[in-house]
Structures are given as structure tokens and as C-alpha cells.
Image: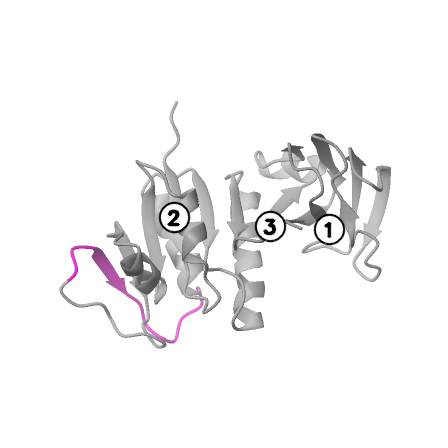
Amino acid sequence: MSMKRCILIGASPDTDINTISRLMRKGDYIICADGGYIFAEKLGISPDLIVGDFDSSERPENCKSEIISLPVRKDDTDMLYAIKEGIRRGCDGFIMLGATGGRLDHTYANFCALKYLADRGIPAYIDDGRNEIRIINGSDRLVESGGGMSNFIIKHRERHGFGIFPFGCGRCRVSLRGFEYNAENVELTADFPLGVSNKVASDFAEVSVHRGCAIIILESM
């Protein structure tokens, strides 16, 4: 069964339009969150959908895209609303662009939105041109939720920086193979950043999360 992949374009001022161009492919469903449509316009892209409260950018006019205007006072961020709308429209994989940089609280909120997808077993990651950010749920959580991912394979990414930390929990238990610093069933805690400044050291590396939930950051060096 073919996937309906969704490209989400956020409004971070640090958005790299070259990354958007590199990752997009024919058949992607494109949703712009608020001012993210400005970056799509620069690339000559007509999004399938634009959602937002347009508090930091003007509502687009005379465009062919469907637009959903949201109230400024709401619980969901524009990005999380876009994710939920993408799921409702049948998308089963997400790449979040324009989701880091700018306001730190918005960046963190997008990490939380990434976890929203992971908890529902939907493949997703954030890419800002320098970093790929993913959330991996442990195998114990998969039993509870019925979905998700407990392993992540990194291929042909030698000499890339890597970090892993608990996310949304106090501790997680992980194994790392193919890294400069390998680990086997090691516990990471939220109050001690043991998982920082690692490196992929082979053409095939594997991350396993046995318990808890982890955020991983793969950095181009």
C-alpha cells in the first residue's frame, strides 16, 4: 500500500527553502502552517492546504490553495492543527519543515507535535537542513498504544553527530550500535544529558528504545 506523505511547512524565520526543495517529491500532500506559505511561494509551490490564525503573517489572497482560518485564541498550535487535519485527510507519514529556530517555545511545541505523531504510530521527523529530529517510543509503550517505532536504523551517515535524550518521561532505556559510544540497555535520565555529543561511526547504526520515550537528533557535521 502506498503512503500518502504530508510535507508540513512552518513559519520559522530560519526555514531553509533549499531543504524544502530537496525533500519534496511528486504526490506529496503539502500543508503550510500560517506563514509557511511564504516559503512555498518562493519556490513556486501551490500548497494543497494553508491553515493558521495569521497573527504573524497576512492571510494569503488570490491563491488557489484551500485555506482554513483559525482563531488566535485556541489550544492547538497552527502546526498541530495542520497535523490533525493531515491525518483526517488520510496522510500516514509527515515531514515537518520550518519547525525549528525562531521562538524557542514554538520549536519545543513542534517537538511535542512530533510526539503526538509517534504516539499514534505515524512515521514523522523534523528536518531543518542541518538536523533530523525524531521521537522513538519504547517497546513497552508500543504495547500500550498499539503502534509506533522502537527501532531506528541509520544508513550511510558516517561522521554525523548524534544525541539522544528522554522526552516526555523521566527516564528511558536504550541500546546504541554502530556509534562512537555504543550502549547496551543503558538508562538515560532527564536530569543528566548522557546522550549528548555522540557520533555515527559506521555505515549502519541502530537505535533501540526498550522503555520510555526518546528524542534523537541526527546532525550533519
3D distance between C-alphas at marks 2 and 3: 19 Å
From the top left corner, tell me how far across and down residue 20 is, in percent. Answer: 41, 51
**Residue 83 appears in view:** no
Q: How many other residues sit within 10 Å of disc 1, few (<14), some (14-19) or many (≥20)?
A: some
Q: Which residues are magenta?
A: 63-76
Disc on the earlier residue, 3 or 1 = 3
| Circles 3 and 1 in contact, beta carbons < 8 Å | no
Please tell me which residue lies in front, 189 or 39: 39
From the top left corner, tell me how far across and down residue 210 is, in percent. Answer: 76, 37
The dot on residue 21 is 2
Label 1 amino acid? Gly
Left or right of 60? Residue 190 is right
| Circles 2 and 1 in contact, beta carbons < 8 Å | no
Q: Above or below — where is 148 with respect to 40?
A: above
From the top left corner, tell me how far across and down residue 151 is, in percent. Answer: 67, 33
Query: Which residue is denoted by mark 3 in the rendering?
Result: 133
Q: Nearer the viewer, mark 2 or mark 1?
A: 2
Query: Which residue is denoted by mark 1 in the rendering?
Result: 163
Q: Kindly identify the residue that appears in the image at 33 percent across and 52 percent down.
A: 31
The dot on residue 212 is none
Please tell me which residue lies in front, 121 or 110: 110
Give the main secondary structure, helix, strand or loop, of the magenta stretch: loop
